[in-house]
Amino acid sequence: MVLGAVALSLGISTGQLTAATANTSTATAQDYSAALQQPGVVSTAIYADNKPDVFARASAARDAFGFPVGAKRSGRHVHDGFQKADYDEVSEVDASNNPLSMTQFDDGGNLLSAVRFDTASGQEASAGSDAAVKSAQRGLTASGMHVSGQARTQANNVTGGWDVQWDRVEAGIAVRGDETHVHVWQDGRIQSVARVQHDLAPAPGQRLGEAQAHQVVDGQMTSWLAGKASGYSIGAMDMEWVGPNAAFNSSKLSQAPEPYRLAWVANVKPLGAAADGITLITLFVDAGDGTIIGGDVVE
């Protein structure tokens, strides 16, 4: 609906934007089982004798986060055709084959997510956000995961406890959407860990200046709004690592996801008639060649 509004208001070629987010803080075993039944998802069993490295990593992560140890373990390799992703998954199960916890790793052996399926102790929270951050940091360090910068904490009013989050920064520049998220129960135990991390393309040797990027955005908006009773206002621009997408180029819809690229991110507020259906347009301007490599639209 949002992209359709853009096409009608600006007369530009648009493509469907898709995004997938995972919040393991409220996930259940049934959620994961249901996800694996979706079309395009292929699951193949793996075992400790043919994938010992995967099971060893799963054991290390389980112990680092203090997850329960099951009577046995089961594993599978998952190919998700929709998200164009492959990962290995190991679950701790009890004697009745009920899952107790689960860990997922990408093809490079990096932790994607970990979650325990039992419940919190029900004890009243006795420590604040600082204690939650320390608990999360201890678990991440023990698992070999590195985070840097200031953690952001927020009380979780739905499940209780704290959500602790670190945004990813590379070479002093934020990676848009990448983060490490830890949910800490009110009794101080880690309930889930999730990491979103994309591959990065090499930074360009020569970078486009902000003034040049502003000119690119100005030229694109002028072209889109030519002959229409509309205007626009370009807000502050930041340089970030971003994922190229098909927001303004539908020919890229069938292409596999690309590594993130360094770009100027411009937020543009439509004015006049264009503002009737659109609140904000975000443009990604490649910091190397100045091309528009994607963006986003807010209705």
Image (spheres, helix red, strand yellow):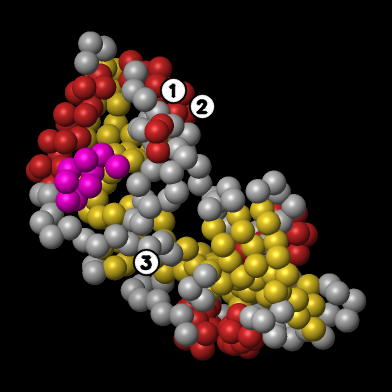
Is disc 2 surrounded by few (<14), some (14 to 19) or many (20+) residues within 10 Å?
few
Toward which corner of the image does residue 30 lie, by quadrant? bottom right
Residue at the outermost right position: 96
Amino acid type, residue under disc 1 in the picture: Ala
Q: How many neighbours does mark 3 have within 10 angstroms: few (below 14), some (14-19), or many (20 or more)?
A: many
Task: Name the residue located 55 percent from the left edge and 51 percent from the top edge.
Answer: 83
Q: Decide which of tag 1 and tag 3 comes sooner along the chain.
A: 1
Residue 78 image offset from top left, x and y in percent: 64, 62
Res 28 label? none
Q: Disc 3 on helix, strand or loop? A: strand
Question: Residue 45's image quarter?
Answer: bottom right
| Nearest to N terminus: mark 2 or mark 3 | 2
* CB under 8 Å between discs 1 and 2: yes
Horizontal side of 22 relative to 237 (left or right) equals right
Spatial separation of the CA atoms under disc 1 and disc 3: 32 Å
- The count of marks equals 3
Residue type at mark 2 is Met
Q: Tell me: residue 141, above or below residue 161.
A: below
Q: Is residue 49 left or right of residue 228?
A: right
The residue that label 3 is drawn on is 168
Rendering coords of residue 163 (x, y %): 54, 67
Cα distance in 3D space between marks 1 and 2: 6 Å
Q: Magenta region: which residues?
A: 285-293
Residue 73 visible (yes or no): yes
Q: Is residue 64 above or below residue 205?
A: below
- Circle 2 residue: 1
Residue 246 spot, x, y in % from top left:
40, 38
- The circle on residue 5 is 1
- The structure residue drawn at horizontal position 47% and vertical position 40%, both measured from the top left corner, is 254
